[in-house]
Amino acid sequence: MGQDNKKLPVYLVLGLVVLGLWYVVYKQLLPLSHFLAYRFFGLEQGSHLGAAVQFFVYDTPKVMMLLLLIVFVVGVLRSFFTPERTRKILAGRRESVGNVMGALLGIVTPFCSCSAVPLFIGFVQAGVPLGVTLSFLIAAPMVNEIALVLLYGLLGWKIATLYLLTGLSVAIIAGMVIGKLKLESSIEDWVREMRDGASSKDEVVLSLTDRLLQGRQAVREIVGRVWIYVVAGIGVGAAIHGYVPENFMASLMGKDAWWSVPVAVLVGIPMYSNAAGIVPVVEALLGKGAALGTVLAFMMSVIALSLPEMVILRKVLKPKLIAVFVGVVGCGILFTGFLFNLVI
């Protein structure tokens, strides 16, 4: 620890230098995208192809730079919130308080689809109530740091804040409703019969260097896993931005089309993407006249109710509980979409 204290000023100086360079490059992305699209490639400004290419060469480095920065920072912060520590915090909490804590911890706890089953089993073994566990499992993929930072970087703090508040509300209320239904019998028998025989492990005290290395490892793992979805999402967004006529989406996904919210949810469920891939599509849809509530409902359904996620959870949940889970969360998403379309 003494060595780390000596290195702290060096780390701070290096961090400030890197952050300064990051900011300078980030501010030059827009003029650079115009140069590349309209001068280097020689595309006509205002043409469909020109607009699509400019969107793509601007958003790709922009989203990747945001991802690199936030994933590193959150990777360091997450070294303080391991799944084991989260499980200990939630164990024994009563439903209402536990639902709020579970949803909030879902934002900062490492999570991916592959970890849903072991996390669920660990929570059940630790005596975490079913509703609290599901509040966590809803919030973790839906209201994560990637979604929030990309929404902030591409669409501004107001939409990012709205998404945070509504996503947490859906996770908390859905978990509370499912908890009140007393569906513990719909957990697969082999999970309920398990007993937590493992001895609790002592918390490993990490040094500052260890935490920075965890941040670097998070960048390698997360960015390495999602970059293809980022590029694909930006490609779809670029096509929408360049070729879909202005306000065309208003007739399909606008406020006046009452059916647009349920259709957006139904379309989103079978899709498989993550926040990094879906946010550029959201940006393009909003730019073409789609209503905010409809687009947020679409995004939430893609992230929180994806078919692959349900297939994974089927290992530990019986069909009845999965159906209730989809129904309750789906109703929360529908309510969110209709509410935003009504008031905004």
Image (cartoon, rainbow, N blue to C red):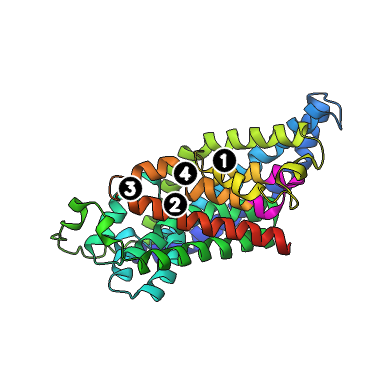
Q: Decide: few, some or many residues near mark 2? Use Cα within 10 Å; few <14, some 14-19, many ≥20.
A: some
Give the labeled residue for mark 4: 306
Q: Of the residues under marks 2 and 1, which one precedes in the sequence?
A: 1
Q: Of the residues under marks 4 and 3, which one precedes in the sequence?
A: 4
Q: What residue type is labelled 4?
A: Ser
Q: Which of 264 and 23 is in front in this view?
A: 264
In the rendered image, which quarter is residue 136 located in? bottom left
Give the labeled residue for mark 3: 319
Task: Tell me the tag on residue 267.
Answer: 1
Quarter of the N terminus within the rendering: bottom left
Q: What residue type is labelled 1?
A: Val
Q: In this view, does 282 lie to the left or right of 325?
A: right
Q: Nearer the viewer, residue 215 or 330?
A: 330
Q: What stretch is highlighted in magenta?
A: 283-295
Identify the secondary structure beneath mark 1: helix
Give the labeled residue for mark 2: 326
Q: Decide: few, some or many residues near mark 3? Use Cα within 10 Å; few <14, some 14-19, many ≥20.
A: some
Which residue sits at x=24%, y=67%? 127
Q: Of the residues under marks 1 and 4, which one precedes in the sequence?
A: 1
